[in-house]
Image (tube, rainbow, N blue to C red):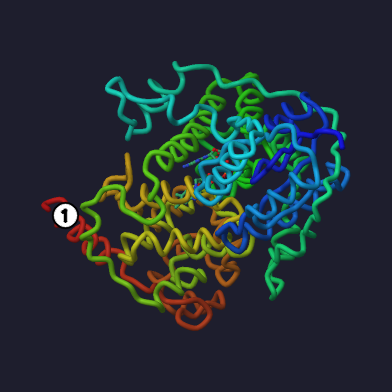
Amino acid sequence: MSQKNIVFLFNNLRVSDNPALYHSIKDGDTSVIYNYGNQNIGAASKVWLHHSLIEFKKQLNHALNIQNDCSEELLNNLIKKDKIKSIYLNRSITPDQAYEMKKIIEFGKNNEIPVYCYESESLWHPDEIHKNDGTPYKVFTPFYRKGCLPHSVPRKPYPTPNLNISTLNIRSLNIEDLNLLPSIRWDKQLVDLWDISEEGAHKQLNEFIEVGLTNYKEGRNFPAKPYISKLSPYLHFGQLSINELWHIILNQEDSKSKDHFLSELGWREFSIYLLHHFKNLQTENFQKKFDKFPWKYDEKTLQNWQKGQTGIPIVDAGMRELYTTGFMHNRSRMIVGSFLVKNLLIDWRHGERWFWDCLFDADHASNSASWQWVAGSGADAAPYFRIFNPVTQAAKFDPDGEYIKKYVPELKKCPLKYLFAPWEAPDHELRAFGIILGETYPKPIVDLKKSRESALEAFQLLKQT
Ligand SMILES: Cc1cc2nc3c(=O)[nH]c(=O)nc-3n(C[C@H](O)[C@H](O)[C@H](O)COP(=O)(O)OP(=O)(O)OC[C@H]3O[C@@H](n4cnc5c(N)ncnc54)[C@H](O)[C@@H]3O)c2cc1C
């Protein structure tokens, strides 16, 4: 039996700039195991993963071995049936994946099999970036400008290796065995909107460079405009390498938008960094004083928010974009987040959970860090008095009502002067456009002015504690 290397993948479902795959193939005969590891991921992520695995398996000429759990028994079986020379991994800080990774490293140690780990999740390893006193940064700008940028130029991407992947003698699961698809098939129409593959990631990137990048700095604020990259799910699942993206954008000409885009990748780094240093970011307030915050909870109100039935058009448009596409524009994420946490006073963790279940890009680090940012409980968070007014936000960032009308068709005929706050219009005027509040479209579930004042009071009290 000839010796072979094993690449264990938890993510990084791509062949280009995949450090573990590249080094393993360079070193010799290679087999690849995808280890699902019973991950605790949301429904939309499962769907994306299912399709990613199908495409990735094709790329490896069907020689991808799939496992649900790398148990001791499975690993022992592996060395019994195949002669293992070395193990190659890409490091992950996502808790479920980090746990699986540790098991494999331990197994390598106990069996005297060398294990090689590579960085591919972030551009700078979180342990390498710290303040002069050695403690972690808690504010984005110094983290990025003083910590990351001067530290080093991110590693250049590795070339794609010649793929000649060997099969293993242990049985592989079928992708279907992971049960990633929902029993009620709500996923089909969402999946049709995306090309869930490594090739799809590159197509998306090229389209963004052609259409979006030059307009990105200003244009990224307008949810109806095609000026954002929509690369987040590909980055999350590793169908696009963050190093490759960084260097491709760095080499573009337009410097203003280019720098702005790179700094957004910096926010991604910051989220990973925070999760690395503060492991409970998904469940615990970063600022402990928020533990005493008097959140309100009302099931019906939460459901209205989740379904896009709040009666506030821009909020409903955002929530319905999420539900019908598996994605939501960043501007809308901030608006619906602020509305949930500040106008409805519902704990940010309920929002985080819903996004976790519905977003194709649901990411442990970015989702938790961003929700805490919106709530004001996070590191470098939005100050408590910044309460987005969804009416002025809509007027400013969806001035033609294109986004609202796309996702809230009940208001398609509503004239622009009433579109952002239809409750302010006289009933008979709305009726002329087929709109009856409380019947064809909900009345607002909360008074924006009063709820803003209540939020300010509650947050003010917190300030005094
Ligand atoms: C409440 C809330 C929840 C969020 N949850 C997630 C999440 O689960 N997963 C996720 O990837 N992003 C999350 N974000 C951040 C941001 O909204 C998305 O990364 C972005 O909208 C993705 O669209 P894009 O790829 O077109 O971004 P672009 O504007 O094209 O930016 C390019 C890339 O930069 C990164 N990026 C941009 N903005 C941010 C940011 N604020 N924080 C971290 N990274 C950023 C992403 O990787 C993104 O793909 C959240 C933001 C908010 C306000």
> Is 153 on the left or on the right of 173, as rendered?
left
Amino acid type, residue under disc 1 in the picture: Gln
Mark 1 burial class by Cα count in 10 Å: few <14, some 14-19, many 20+: few
Which residue occupies the foreground of this view, 23 or 376? 23
Residue 359: quadrant of the picture: bottom right
Residue on which the image places disc 1: 460
User: In the figure, 300 relative to 407: above or below?
Assistant: below
Secondary structure found at label 1 = helix
Image coords of residue 135 (percent x, y): 30, 29
> Is 397 on the left or on the right of 42, as rendered?
left
Q: Is mark 1 within 8 Å of ligand 1?
A: no
User: In the figure, 211 relative to 318: above or below?
Assistant: above
Which residue occupies the foreground of this view, 76 or 437? 76
Residue located 78% across and 49% down the image: 65
Image coords of residue 35 (percent x, y): 67, 50
Which residue occupies the foreground of this view, 292 or 401? 292
User: In the figure, 364 relative to 431: above or below?
Assistant: above
> Is 185 on the left or on the right of 317, as rendered?
right
Image coords of residue 188 (percent x, y): 74, 65
Residue located 78% across and 29% down the image: 25
Seen as rendered, the residue at the extreme left is 464
Q: How many marks?
A: 1
Image coords of residue 90 (percent x, y): 62, 36
Placement of the N terminus among the 4 image quadrants: top right
Residue located 69% across and 74% down the image: 183
